[in-house]
Image (cartoon, rainbow, N blue to C red):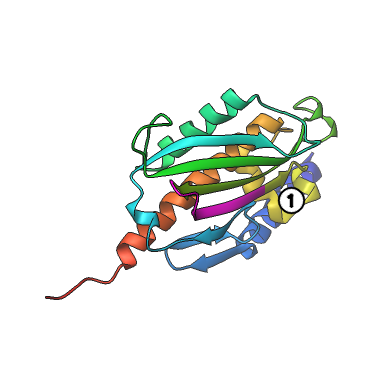
Amino acid sequence: MLLQGSSKLAILSIIFILSFLGCSTQKGGTRFRSTPFQTSFVDPEILNKISSLTVSNVQWAAGTESCLNREDLAHKTQAAFEGASTVKFVTLGNDNDARLNINVVSCEERIGSSFGSDRPARVGFLISIVNKESKELWSGTFSMKDTAILENLLAAPEKLKVGAKWLTSEEIMIHGLTLAAKEFETQRSRMFLEKPSVIK
């Protein structure tokens, strides 16, 4: 019994040490290098000027499973951005600053249950924000395949943010949208704070 307790303590210690080593300190905070969301383009001049958005285009790449229907995905995208950002959402056709597009490039549902899985869930998407003239203002990519915690210790901290169980594709999708929304707002705030003041 003591050996089992010692083994659990050793495993938890290894997870903690590896999660610490997997962190990189950057200006403005600490983040995991293995984060599944990455920004691919930012227009620094326009980003912090965006005050309103609308979910304009939701699509799936050819041959990709539709894990969520378009309406559900549009609602979850809007909810994620409203929860993390100060940008307000308006209906398409209103005088909005920008439009949000999402393209799901991979989506595999879990085969199994939350306790055991024959095939883990996987989700990948491209997300972008464009202006009325379709000029890209911001974009990023998300890709995450669920794994057992002990299978990939470096990814354990990110996995535990969503849950220790085997996840559904919807849970991974929501996690990805939340990461995207938080990163968008972080970059907007950074652009605003780093904008040089004009001395008259």
Instruction: State yes or no: residue 64 in magenta.
Output: no
**Residue 127 visible to the viewer:** yes
Task: Decide if residue 139 is on the left or right side of residue 88.
Answer: right
Q: Where residue 117 sits: x, y (%)?
A: 83, 31
Q: 71 or 132: nearer the eye?
A: 132
Which residue shows up at 56% across the image and 36% down it?
57
The residue singled out by tag 1 in the image is 11
Q: Quadrant of residue 28?
A: bottom left
Q: Is residue 77 above or below residue 27?
A: above
Report the number of discs.
Answer: 1
Find the residue positioned furthest to the front.
133
Where in the figure is residue 81, as x and y percent of width and height?
45, 39
* Residue 71 picture location, percent across and down: 57, 24
- Residue 163 seen in the figure: no
Magenta-colored span: 132-142
| Quadrant (top left, top right, bottom left, bottom right) of the C terminus | bottom left
Location of residue 199 by image quarter: bottom left
Residue occupying image coordinates x 64% and y 62%: 22
Question: Dominant secondary structure of the magenta stretch?
Answer: strand
In-front residue for pair 88/22: 88
Indicate the secondary structure of the residue bearing disc 1.
helix
Q: Does 73 appear above or below 148?
A: above
Q: Quadrant of the N terminus?
A: top right
In this rendering, position of residue 200 left or right of residue 1:
left
Residue at the outermost right position: 118
Along the line of sight, the residue nearer the viewer: 85 or 51: 51
Label 1 Cα neighbours within 10 Å, binned few <14 / some 14-19 / many ≥20:
some
Q: Residue at x 43, y 46 (%)?
A: 132
In the image, 35: left or right of 85? right
